[in-house]
Image (spheres, rainbow, N blue to C red):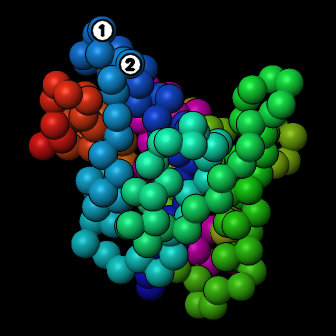
C-alpha cells in the first residue's frame, strides 16, 4: 500500500517561519524549507505512488517549483488574486486532487497531508472533510504539520483515525537559514 502525498506548501512554509521566529529569532527572512529532507521525513522509507503540491506562483526567478519537480512531485501553481495579491483556490486544488485519488485508486493506500489548515470543516468542506471521506473509503490517514500552527480538529482527527506527525522535533533537519545554517 503506497503513499499518496498532498503538500500545502504555503501553510508548511508560513507556519515554519513562525516556528523559526521562536527557535532562531531574527532569521525569519532567511528561513527556508529543505524540500528533499522534508520529503524523506514524510516518506519514512516507504514507497511513494503519488505526490502532489500546490501553491501560489512565486517570482519568475524563483526555482522553488523546479525543486519539487526534481523530487517527482506533481506541481500545480495558482496565480495570486489580482486585486488582493493573496492566494486563490490553492487549498481547493489540493482537496480536489485528494478526492480524485479516493475515487480513482483501488485498493486504497495511505493518504499523507502536509498542512495545519483545518478551516472550512464546520461548513462541510476543507482538508478535514476530505480526510474523513478518504478514511470512510478505506484509506490510511497521516497528517504532517507544525504543531505550532495545526488546527486542533485536524490534529485530533489524525490522532484518532490514523497518525499525526509533528515537524518541530525535526526542525533542524527539514529547514535551513539561507547563508547561515544548513539542514542537518
Quarter of the figure with the N terminus: bottom left
Residue that numbered label 1 is attached to:
26
From the viewer's perspective, tell me whether residue 141 is left or right of residue 18.
Answer: right
- Location of the C terminus (image quadrant): top left
Q: Indicate yes or no whether the magenta region holds residue 148.
A: yes
Say if 120 sits above or below 40 in the image: above
Residue 29, disc: 2
- Which residue is at 30% across, 9% downward? 26
Residue 148: percent from the left, percent from the top? 43, 26
Q: Residue furthest top?
A: 26
Circle 1 SS class: loop
Is residue 3 toward the left or the right of residue 102 in the image?
left
Residue drawn where x is 75% and y is 26% of the image:
85
Q: Residue furthest front?
A: 61
* Tag 2 secondary structure: helix
Specify the segment rendered in magenta: 135-151
Whether residue 90 is in magenta: the answer is: no
Rendered location of residue 181, percent (x, y): 15, 29
Amino acid at each position: 500500500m503506497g503513499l499518496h502525498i498532498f503538500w500545502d506548501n504555503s501553510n508548511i512554509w508560513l507556519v515554519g517561519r513562525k516556528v523559526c521566529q521562536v527557535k532562531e529569532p531574527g532569521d525569519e527572512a532567511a528561513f527556508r524549507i529543505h524540500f528533499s529532507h522534508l520529503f524523506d521525513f514524510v516518506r519514512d522509507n516507504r514507497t511513494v505512488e503519488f505526490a502532489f503540491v500546490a501553491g501560489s506562483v512565486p517570482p519568475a526567478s524563483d526555482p522553488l517549483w523546479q525543486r519539487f519537480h526534481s523530487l517527482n512531485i506533481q506541481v500545480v501553481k495558482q496565480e495570486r488574486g489580482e486585486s488582493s495579491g493573496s492566494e486563490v483556490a490553492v487549498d481547493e486544488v489540493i482537496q480536489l486532487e485528494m478526492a480524485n485519488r479516493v475515487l480513482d485508486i483501488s485498493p486504497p493506500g495511505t493518504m499523507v497531508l502536509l498542512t495545519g489548515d483545518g478551516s472550512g470543516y464546520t461548513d462541510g468542506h476543507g482538508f478535514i472533510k476530505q480526510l474523513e471521506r478518504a478514511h470512510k473509503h478505506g484509506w490510511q490517514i497521516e497528517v504532517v504539520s507544525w504543531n505550532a500552527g495545526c488546527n486542533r480538529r485536524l490534529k485530533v482527527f489524525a490522532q484518532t483515525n490514523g497518525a499525526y506527525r509533528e515537524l518541530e522535533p525535526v526542525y533542524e533537519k527539514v529547514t535551513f537559514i539561507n547563508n547561515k545554517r544548513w539542514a542537518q
